[in-house]
Image (tube, rainbow, N blue to C red):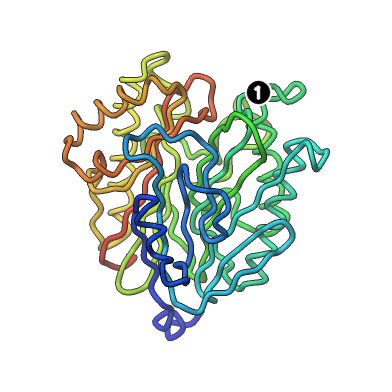
């Protein structure tokens, strides 16, 4: 896109709201651009939901995205999307029991349809992906299901000519207990800037011990979302140093390590933009393997960042399995701040 075209793009805006406040936005019959719901009704076409139990005291929540008013809805293959010509939010669900294929093939098919939808709408730059896999740590016929998913995902990226290594989009992959493979994604027409964590090996450079195909995501991404604002999308982050899990069987220590990793990602992001991001001011989603551990995770966040911090008071807690059997908690986050990309 030319510099002139970029200046004409409408701004994208996000806010975290309760389900009640989210639904109030459609009282005039015109829903917002799109939303990602946590514990929200599944029948809302503009708000694809995450199929995981909400553990937060506040109940169902949503990250609501606002764009221009000229919104088109459509489908590409199995992908359902909403697009204003500049920004796009899409969702896809594929069920192994219905499709009669394994998870690697299912992931490949899902991402094939996603890339087709990007081409159809012209919003060909992936900004953020959310992946939810049933039984993520289960045995898929000799290979862990998460590793099967990684194989299919990476193959689709390579075939589509998308960045599967350096420059891969921000993403997370969590385990749900049952149901379909669910993927939600946000895309635009401006290339994001990838961010890595100096405390960790980049996921796409993990050694073969973690599977025949490495995970396809960057630790975070920065995106110019118009209106003089930059968005920071932090991928699912856990208690990993280098490429190894640390603090086995200790959810408190894992949460503390996760917060250190999040802080390192924020610092790395700030080096690539004039926008200033601060860890206590992020909107986060904390995925907890064992529901009873949510209270411990919350206590650590309160202690480290402050009980009154935005991070603590706006956190969403979900019960979900993490991509490694030995990880007990994973946290993703996002924020918007005024500034420009360096």
| 1 w.r.t. 125: above or below | below
Q: Nearer the viewer, residue 156 or 84?
A: 84
Side of 113 where 339 appears, left or right: left
Q: Can I make out residue 340 in this image?
A: yes
**Residue on which disc 1 sits:** 138
Q: What residue is drawn where x is 73% and y is 38%?
A: 104
**Horizontal and vertical percent for residue 165?**
57, 48
Q: Can I make out residue 240 in this image?
A: no
**Horizontal and vertical percent for residue 305?**
20, 36
Q: What residue is drawn where x is 36% and y is 51%?
A: 334
**Horizontal and vertical percent for residue 195?**
41, 50
Furthest residue toward bottom: 4
Number of numbered callouts drawn: 1
**Horizontal and vertical percent for residue 154?**
66, 45
Q: Nearer the viewer, residue 163 or 41?
A: 41
Furthest residue toward right: 100
Secondary structure type for disc 1: loop
Q: Quadrant of the C terminus?
A: bottom left
User: Which image quadrant is residue 318 in?
Assistant: top left
Q: Nearer the viewer, residue 171 or 138?
A: 138
Q: What residue is drawn where x is 83% and y is 38%?
A: 100
Q: What residue is drawn where x is 46% and y is 57%?
A: 35
| Crowdedness near tag 1: few (<14), some (14–19) or many (≥20) residues, C-alpha within 10 Å | some
Side of 2 where 315 appears, left or right: left
């Amino acid at each position: 896109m030319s510099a002139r075209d970029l200046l004409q793009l409408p701004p994208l805006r996000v806010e975290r709201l309760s389900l009640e406040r989210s639904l109030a936005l459609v009282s005039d019959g015109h829903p917002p651009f799109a939303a990602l719901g946590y514990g929200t009704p599944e029948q809302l076409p503009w708000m694809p939901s995450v199929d995981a139990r909400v553990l937060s005291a506040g109940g169902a929540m949503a990250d609501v995205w606002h764009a221009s008013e000229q919104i088109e809805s459509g489908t590409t293959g199995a992908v359902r999307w909403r697009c204003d010509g500049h920004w796009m939010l899409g969702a896809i669900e594929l069920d192994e029991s219905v499709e009669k294929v394994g998870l690697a093939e299912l992931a490949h098919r899902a991402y094939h349809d996603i890339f087709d939808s990007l081409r159809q709408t012209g919003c060909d730059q992936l900004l953020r992906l959310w992946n939810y896999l049933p039984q993520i740590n289960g045995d898929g016929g000799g290979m862990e299901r998460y590793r099967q998913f990684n194989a299919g995902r990476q193959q689709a990226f390579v075939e589509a000519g998308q960045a599967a290594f350096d420059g891969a989009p921000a993403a997370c992959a969590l385990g749900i207990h049952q149901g379909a493979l669910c993927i939600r994604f946000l895309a635009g027409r401006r290339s994001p800037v990838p961010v890595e964590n100096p405390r960790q090996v980049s996921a796409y450079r993990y050694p073969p011990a973690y599977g025949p195909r490495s995970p396809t995501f960057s630790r975070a991404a920065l995106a110019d979302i118009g209106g003089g604002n930059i968005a920071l999308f932090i991928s699912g982050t856990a208690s990993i140093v280098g490429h190894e899990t640390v603090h086995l069987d200790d959810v408190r220590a894992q949460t503390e390590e996760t917060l250190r990793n999040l802080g390192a990602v924020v610092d790395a992001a700030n080096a690539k933009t004039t926008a200033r991001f601060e860890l206590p001011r992020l909107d986060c989603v904390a995925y907890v393997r064992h529901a009873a551990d949510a209270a411990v995770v919350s206590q650590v966040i309160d202690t480290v960042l402050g009980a009154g911090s935005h991070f603590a008071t706006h956190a969403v807690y979900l019960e979900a399995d993490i991509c490694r059997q030995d990880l007990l908690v994973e946290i993703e986050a996002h924020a918007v701040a005024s500034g420009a990309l360096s």
